[in-house]
Amino acid sequence: MKSTLNKSGFTLMEIMIALGILAVGLALVSTAFPSAMMENKESVEKTMTTLIGENALAICRIRLSHNDIKDIVGTTLTDITDRIPLAERAYPIARGEPSGNNDDWIETPAGSGNYLPSSRYGWLLAAKQFGDDDDNDYLLVIVPYRKLLPDDQIPCFQQVTTNAEGNKITSGNIFVGSPVISITDGSFAFVKDAQGNLSGTISPGDALVVAGKDSNGNVRTGADSPAIGCYVARTNVLP
């Protein structure tokens, strides 16, 4: 006895339709990856900004003295990064002392005798005072950063000027990703593009941005900023 089975395969048209559906699906999925990666990067940077900022604020409260800084900090933001020891501005804090045999420090350039913590993360500090010299009342602006290369020099503040609307840099070097911090009140926004447009509006006029430095101490002009965020707190310090 013989049985007859229908053994029909897929037609060319069915295969082409299936491939078309697959291509559309892959295209939709692929567009989600860049945005997901960007959101993940922003989430990591926000978390690191909070961790480093709170750690730095605690260090500032026990390291800064009102009597020591009241004569150098005015009513506009002043860079006082060097008032905190270099090892304590690394994150995590560098151990030991800078020497050629210490793994927590890097000599850069080689043979210069200039040692830097090998940590990729760290922070800069600017401050302004409220009231007069007798008032122990300060605005601390902490800018966490991530060095592009481990042996890069510590980044630095540079001054720029914003337009009357406070939403674009009109004078000074532009570093995409850097916070632009008004020296009058500490308001800040971030540089969005190479034209100096900001992510928001700040008090117009002079402001501070963060520039990266290579291993020889040269500012990386035309490069993105190593800053990953901005942490602002109003606090007192030691008497």
Image (cartoon, rainbow, N blue to C red):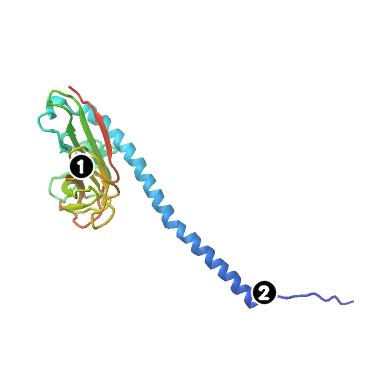
Please state which amino acid type lies under the numbered disc 1.
Answer: Ser
What's the mark number on residue 10?
2
Compared with 139, 112 (above or below) is below
Instruction: Find residue 152 and report its horizontal and vertical position in percent.
Output: 21, 50
Question: Mark 2 and mark 1: span between their CA atoms?
Answer: 67 Å
Q: Are marks 2 and 1 in contact (CB under 8 Å)?
A: no
What residue is drawn where x is 29% and y is 46%? 228
What residue is drawn where x is 39% and y is 45%? 43
What residue is drawn where x is 26% and y is 33%? 233
Q: Residues within 10 Å of mark 2 (few under 14, many from 20)?
A: few
Instruction: Find residue 85 and report its horizontal and vertical position in percent.
Output: 18, 35
What residue is drawn where x is 25% and y is 30%? 234
Residue 214 makes an appearance in the image: no
N-term mark: 2 or 1: 2
Q: Nearer the viewer, residue 98 or 41?
A: 41
Give the structural element (helix, strand or loop) at label 1.
strand
Residue at label 1?
A: 182
> In the figure, residue 45 lies in which quadrant?
top left
